[in-house]
């Protein structure tokens, strides 16, 4: 049961706590309350979409991300989240386009480059996938985040044995 006296920002904060605690139904409920409190809250809609994706409600997640982008079409992480939901529906070309929108807005957003690489790999587009992954790896060279993630990410299965892919992960 969520308290009724909270503000939109309180519900967004509560949603984040539940989301990062992997309690996606509770996160969804908190974000839903935030949307009820302020239907123009891009943060509330974004959180709602993320929770819906983890609940497997992909069409609703896509609709929530579209709402974020109606409010603020420069919200680069909403483009990436929309791509992630589209990926779950195997709409890889549209997912790639979403990542490209995020990259247009924030060219050094490593997650957009990484996700784009994943979706390209799923389409077996080896060279562009490796180039996108290379960009993500370069942007996170200090901590190796995406280089390490790519080692195990099943999205790269179609290109895992490619020599250039292997070389990128070794260097």
Image: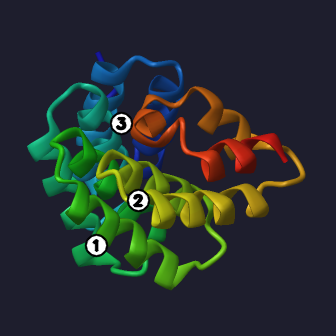
**Disc 2, SS:** helix
Q: Which residue is mark 3?
A: 5
From the top left corner, tell me how far across and down residue 112 is, in percent.
51, 62
> Regarding mark 3 in the picture, which secondary structure is present there?
loop
Q: Is residue 165 positioned above or below 69 on the image?
A: above
- Of labels 3 and 1, the one closer to you: 1
Distance from label 3 to label 2 (Cα)? 32 Å
Give the quadrant of the N terminus.
top left
Label 2 to label 1: alpha-carbon separation: 11 Å
> Which is nearer the eye, 43 or 114?
114
Residue 138 sits in quarter: bottom right
Q: Earlier in the sequence, mark 3 or mark 2?
A: 3
Q: Which mark is residue 81?
A: none
Are there few (<14), some (14-19), or many (20+) residues within 10 Å of tag 2?
A: many
- Colour scheme shown: rainbow
Q: Which residue is mark 2?
A: 80
Query: Which of the two discs, 3 and 1, labels the residue nearer the N terminus?
Result: 3
Camera-nearest residue between 51 and 95? 95
Q: Rounded to the nearest whole Å, what is the CA distance between mark 3 and mark 1?
A: 28 Å
Task: Say whether disc 2 or disc 1 marks the residue closer to the N-terminus.
Answer: 1
Q: Is residue 20 visible?
A: yes
Q: Residue at x 78, y 55 (%)?
A: 140
Q: Residue at x 31, y 56 (%)?
A: 83
Q: Is residue 65 visible?
A: no
Residue at image coords 19%, 28% = 56
Q: Which mark is residue 69?
A: 1
> As drawn, is 21 to the left or to the right of 40?
right
131 to the left or right of 3: right
Residue farthest toward the bottom in the current orientation of the protein: 104
Q: Looking at the picture, does residue 35 appear above or below residue 52?
A: below
Disc 3 to disc 1: CB gap under 8 Å: no
């Amino acid at each position: 049961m969520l308290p009724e006296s909270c503000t939109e920002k309180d519900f967004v904060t509560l949603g984040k706590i539940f989301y990062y605690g992997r309690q996606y139904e509770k996160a969804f409920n908190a974000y839903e309350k935030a949307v009820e409190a302020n239907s123009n809250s891009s943060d509330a809609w974004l959180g709602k979409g993320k929770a819906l994706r983890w609940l497997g409600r992909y069409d609703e997640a896509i609709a929530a991300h579209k709402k974020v982008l109606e409010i603020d079409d420069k919200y680069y992480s909403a483009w990436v989240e929309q791509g992630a939901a589209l990926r779950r529906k195997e709409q890889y070309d549209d997912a790639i386009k979403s990542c490209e929108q995020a990259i247009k807005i924030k060219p050094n957003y490593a997650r957009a480059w990484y996700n784009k690489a994943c979706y390209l790999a799923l389409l077996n587009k080896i060279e562009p996938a490796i180039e996108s992954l290379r960009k993500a790896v370069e942007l996170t060279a200090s901590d190796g985040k995406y280089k390490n993630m790519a080692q195990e990410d099943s999205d790269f299965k179609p290109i895992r044995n490619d020599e250039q892919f292997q070389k990128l992960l070794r260097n």
